[in-house]
Image (cartoon, grey):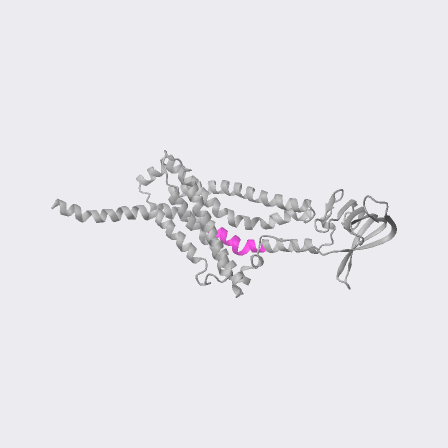
Amino acid sequence: MILFRYLAREIFITMVAVTATLLVIVMSGRFVKYLAQAASGDLAPDVVFSIMAYRLPSFLELVLPLGLFIAILLAYGRLYVESEMTVMSACGLSTRRLALYTLVPSAFVALLVAWLSLSVSPAGIAKVQEIFEDAKNSSGLELLVAGRFRLDEKSGRVTYIERMDDGRQVMEEVFSAEQSRAREGGKKLSVVLAERGTIQNVEQHNARYLVLENGFQYTGKPGSQEFRVTAFEQFGQLVKEPELQRNSYKKADARSTEQLMASDDLEDKATLQWRISLGILVPIIALIAQALSKTSHRRGRYVKMLPAFLIYIVYVVSLNAARDGIEKEKIPLELGMWWVHGIFLLIALGLLFGADGWRRLRASAAKPVDTVAGQ
């Protein structure tokens, strides 16, 4: 029991450190992407942190298995390099018992990953999709920041507001500039200056309008004196509905596990198998990491990191390929992703017990020869 607690503590301490590092790297990259969308006006700045919070479980369900995999490689590799594992083997710690000690902490991680993938992560992804849809259907003021220019890349319109009230319902000192093609050819520039502006919904037309008050509109061709100046008390402009924000998730990812189980759609069935596979993956990669962690002081504990990562990447890519194959009806639903787990379980068992089994086979084959020679 003392030996088990020692090994489990080494695995968990290393796993926490590795997982935290990987999580910071993954979330930083995604956070920078959302900040870029907020800076360009494609995403409301005040929802960035909410999106990151809701996406945290989906990050964890992918980072935790990799963190455990690297933790076992590093922890056991250190024990082999410092000859601690040799001493344990001399005291009776066999490969089979070490595998049992390894599977216990990996079982806790597998349960945590299964809980995240089956329950928490789908709810978080659904919230993220709601935020994107709310940003699409919002009044438009959420995408504007006082004191900053906003460029709409599709229409080419540049908008600037000096101030915005606390309720974000009224814009003050509004500037808007947009280029369009003139009937005579060439480009026409339209510049609007107004004291204030609001967004009004017209339910009978199912449309939204930007209503500007007390301002001027300047229309004409740049570089010429053909400009028209119009003063207005109210000026209405149709606000075009932006397209849906694209994200990396499929529709089935936001559905609950209960909905997936009740559905007959192939995409839902493939998503359900993917969620279950994340939990099954954990103990299998733990056994693979245990087998590949075996090293010596002369070779160091990082010598097998590259082949270990290659096996892990092939495992995850194979599961993704199987998921796509199910959705496209190239792989039978009954076969699903289970064949991938079976193959890598055989690889894990072969790496763990293959050398011992081969030695035993050779020893048993050599026994009759030795007996005959002795006679």
User: Which residue is at 58% across, 55% downward?
Assistant: 123
Q: Residue 193 versus residue 14: which sits nearer the camera? A: 193
Task: Report the magenta stretch's main SS.
Answer: helix
Q: Residue furthest left?
A: 375
Tell me the quarter of the image containing the N terminus.
Answer: top left
Indicate whether residue 121 is drawn in magenta: yes
Residue sitting nearer the eye, 7 or 148: 148
**What x and y, as percent, mark residue 172?**
81, 46
Q: Residue at x 38, y 35 (%)?
A: 299
- Is residue 350 visible to us here? yes
Q: Residue at x 40, y 38 (%)?
A: 303
The answer to if 354 sits in the magenta stretch is: no
Instruction: From the viewer's perspective, tell me whether residue 270 is left or right of residue 295.
Output: right
Q: Position of residue 177 (x, y in %)?
A: 78, 47
Residue farthest to the top? 298
The answer to whether any part of residue 8 appears in the image is: no
Q: Would residue 116 be found to the left or right of residue 368 on screen? A: right
> What range is drawn magenta here?
110-123
Rendering coords of residue 271 (x, y %): 52, 58
Measuring from the top left, give residue 150's x and y in whole percent.
73, 46
